[in-house]
Amino acid sequence: MTLAELQALESERVIGSYARQPVEFVRGEGALLWDAEGNEYLDFLCGISVTSLGHCHPRIVAAVREQAGLLMHTSNLFYTEPAMRLAERLSRSSLGGKVFFCNSGTEANEAALKLARKAKRGGDVVVVQGAFHGRTYGSLSATPQESKQAPFAPLVPGFHAVAPEPEALAAAVTERTAAVLLEPIQGESGVHVLSEELLAAAREACDRHGAALIFDEIQTGMGRTGTLWAYERCGVVPDAMTVAKALGGGLPIGALITGERLADVFEPGDHGSTFAGGPLVARAALAALELTDDAQLLERVQLLGAELAESLQGLPHVVEVRGRGLMLACRLDVPAPQVVTRALLEQRLVLNATGPDTLRLLPPLTLSDEQARDGLARLAGALAG
Ligand code: PLP
């Protein structure tokens, strides 16, 4: 099918909830993508931080191929080894408690919200302005953005948004608070790193009032910021965290991971999902986690991220660079969506805009030095117009 035929089909038959770029990708390998006409692109977006080990990593492909020929689905009425092993691996690499699997980021946050409310019945949830936690009703209620919430009111009650300031957050947490939910680095609103003071204030307020501190590591997790989990560099350990995106190495999976305190809040029947933690995606995630939990790779993400951030500062029209590791954003003095389109169609560089003046870069953690230089040159070309 031609691109024009795909576009015609879309406008006739696909609910119009996405604004797609006029490109059809057909193949990917590492940091590279190819369109239907054979043009090669450099991917600095990774399907929004999903294919963080590059496209079609051979170890993930091999795991999926093998598992697809053995067993793909049984439901959670039975045991399968990949899910149990993945839960053990995830817990051991992070908070040391227990894991609930689901199929996406928003579902991981739904599970976290239900868990927190069960732990403290009827309790409220404090979130931070600028947060993005997903699009289902609980997660949307935790996403204080007028344009995303307003058309879908009424939302779930009991959510309070505060400014990202320690005093405001501390004042909002009371005996009625079940949870504080936050992204240590806010991704969708443009890669805003929350301050250590804010995170420490959240920890202290939660401890004082018996509330759960929950980190949404859906975008920051799986090595993106240069440690396996972003909380490792925040000076604060949450009571639970949610992960998704890169966890499945390109396949859809989400997880809620608890520390010891919240490990046994859910009982049989409290929560569930037909597909969650199926053997196929769990095998992919085990491979992705083993590849990512690698000191050398993570150190390289920190180094390369710092180098990229410095080089980005020197590009024309870049007025600010934000982020950590390979989760970076540039504020521009020209319209970012136009730069994204020029980068894609003229420079064959894939990235995205999180707003009218902000570009986001989420390149693969496996990016080579040469690819990093190449990406910068292409971005400079797109910025030059
Ligand atoms: N939380 C964060 C921090 C995210 O970045 C996203 C997606 O961008 C979500 C939650 C929602 O994840 P999903 O789109 O898999 O439901």
Image (cartoon, rainbow, N blue to C red):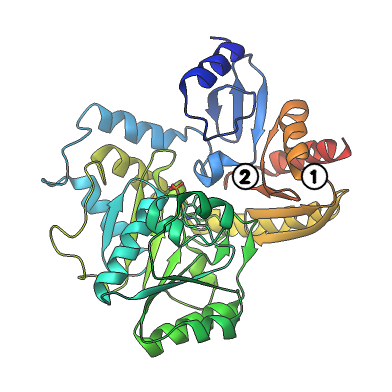
Q: Position of residue 84 (x, y in %)?
A: 21, 53
Reading the image, the residue beneath label 1 is 335
Position in image of residue 1 (x %, y %):
53, 9
Determine the secondary structure under disc 1.
loop
Q: Residue at x 60, y 74 (%)?
A: 163
Q: In the image shown, does 81 or 146 lie closer to the viewer?
A: 146
Q: Secondary structure at mark 2?
A: loop
Q: Earlier in the sequence, mark 2 or mark 1?
A: 1
Q: Is residue 9 visible?
A: yes
Q: Gap between marks 2 and 1, in whole Å?
A: 21 Å
Tell me which corner region of the image, top left, top right, bottom left or bottom right, holds residue 117: bottom left
Q: Is residue 70 shown above or below 218? A: above
Q: Callout 1, which amino acid?
A: Pro
Mark 2 is on which residue type? Answer: Pro
Depth check, front residue: 307 or 363: 363
Q: Quadrant of the C terminus?
A: top right
Question: Is residue 33 found left or right of 338 in the rendered image?
Answer: left
Q: Are marks 2 and 1 in contact (CB under 8 Å)?
A: no
Q: Give residue 74's position: percent from left, percent from top.
A: 16, 38
Q: In the shown orientation, is residue 61 left or right of residue 263?
A: right
Q: Residue 363 has which mark?
A: 2
Say whether residue 120 is left or right of residue 250: left
Residue 187 showing in the rendered view? no
Q: Residue at x 54, y 71 (%)?
A: 233
Quadrant hosting residue 261: bottom left
Residue in front for this viewpoint, 43 or 298: 43
- Count of all numbered marks drawn on residues in the image: 2
Q: Is residue 153 above or below residue 178?
A: above
